[in-house]
Image (cartoon, rainbow, N blue to C red):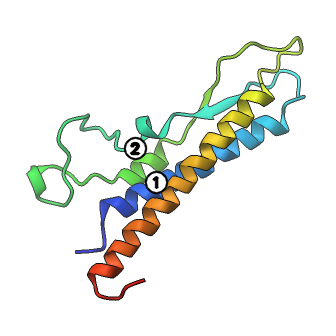
Amino acid sequence: MFQNLEIFRMANALALHSSARQAEVAANVANADTPGYRAGDLAPFSEVYGSDKAGDGMRSTRPGHLGASPIGAAATAEARLSRIETRSGAAPNGNTVSLEAEMMKSVAIKHDHETALSVYESARNILRTSLGRGR
């Protein structure tokens, strides 16, 4: 019953997405002076999470529910962590990295990661309380 709680899968997928996105930002910053380097990013989590082949219609939460296949959101999110090139003006050497934009992205990514941890912790506390184990 408690093996596949969607809230834990969602928090895990958000943490994985934040980690991969932070790695992209770090690569962009590390290559800020590399001639011809094209800055990249990942698709937003809201577009990646739950974007399975079934579309935006109803999704099942367990086998046999609504006669559809299980969501598999964490696996779907992990599979779709592909790099996209950001569109910004290039410097004379062809580099498209903007350190200011990368700093702003980094702050947003940190917020997303902290949100994932907060969701996980809150869900864990609710689950422990419901089992009578408290904090």
Q: Which residue is mark 1?
A: 13
From mark 2 to mark 1, how far is it between C-alphas? 7 Å
Which quadrant is the C terminus positioned in? bottom left
Q: Which residue is mark 2?
A: 49
The answer to which of 25 and 128 lies nearer the viewer is 128
Which quadrant is the N terminus positioned in? bottom left
Q: Position of residue 111 (x, y in %)?
A: 58, 48
Q: Which mark is residue 87?
A: none
The answer to which of 128 and 2 lies nearer the viewer is 128
**Quick check: 135 above or below 70?**
below
**Quick check: 105 above or below 11?**
above
Identified at 50% across, 35% down, the residue is 44
Apparent side of residue 22 relative to residue 81 in the rendered image (left or right): right
Apparent side of residue 8 relative to residue 22 in the rendered image (left or right): left
The answer to the question of whether label 2 and label 1 lie on touching residues, with beta carbons closer than 8 A, is yes
Residue type for callout 1: Ala
